Amino acid sequence: LSQEALGKIVGLTQQAIQAIENGTTAQPRKIKQIALALGTTPESLLFGTGAAEPAAPYNVSDAKYAMIPRYEIAGCMGKGHVNSHEEISGSHAYRRDWLERKKLLPAACVVIDAVGESMQPTIGDGDVVLINTLEKKISNGQVYAFNTEDGVRIKRLFRQLDGRVRVASDNPDKITYPDEW
């Protein structure tokens, strides 16, 4: 199984899988999903210990979970990511009660990949992001995915009193990731 193929199965980039394999990621995200895909246990992957028995498969019921389509596109947390085409490449299960608490309509949600580091520590490179496609009005301080001439971007937005919108990164390095208007 290639790093790219494993990444697609668990929702991480090839680079994220490579960092986990190289040991440069101290606390890998999605270790349970990786273990399930590889037919082993998280303990065996992390520490080389424990029985290498396959993890129990997920039991995803339609009553408890909504399957949200995952698009094979990326939202850049920098200047934008141009996607040459949009294609559904699978789905992610979200608990219906959680979606309801967040006031999210499953049919209006999509999942995309995040690339870049400008939204660290909130969103990391290789994370998947749940997008509410119905939310068009800016609520100050919320994170949005939006399309620009430079491509899809993921940023925190603030509406200013003069009508302008401040586009901000969560990364504390404001020299590399300055606010935009």
Image: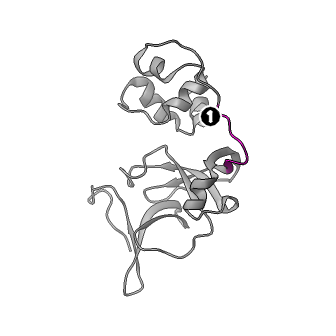
* Residue at 47 percent of width and 17 percent of height: 44
Q: Nearer the viewer, residue 12 or 4?
A: 12
- 131 vs 24, left or right, is right
* Residue at 65 percent of width and 63 percent of height: 105
Residue stretch rendered in magenta on the structure = 58-68
Q: Examine the rendering and report whether any part of residue 2 can be seen.
A: no
Question: Residue 126 appears at what percent x and percent y?
Answer: 49, 43
Question: Residue 77 appears at what percent x and percent y?
Answer: 44, 56
- 105 vs 27, left or right, is right
Q: Residue furthest bottom?
A: 162
Q: Examine the rendering and report whether any part of residue 85 can be seen.
A: yes
Question: Residue 17 appears at what percent x and percent y?
Answer: 49, 31
Asked which quadrant contains residue 107, the reply is bottom right
Question: Residue 152 appears at what percent x and percent y?
Answer: 54, 60
Q: Nearer the viewer, residue 178 or 36?
A: 36
Q: Main secondary structure of the magenta part?
A: loop
Vertical placement of 128 versus 46: above or below?
below
Question: Which quadrant of the figure contains the C terminus?
Answer: bottom left
Q: Nearer the viewer, residue 43 or 157?
A: 43
Question: Which quadrant of the figure contains the N terminus?
Answer: top right
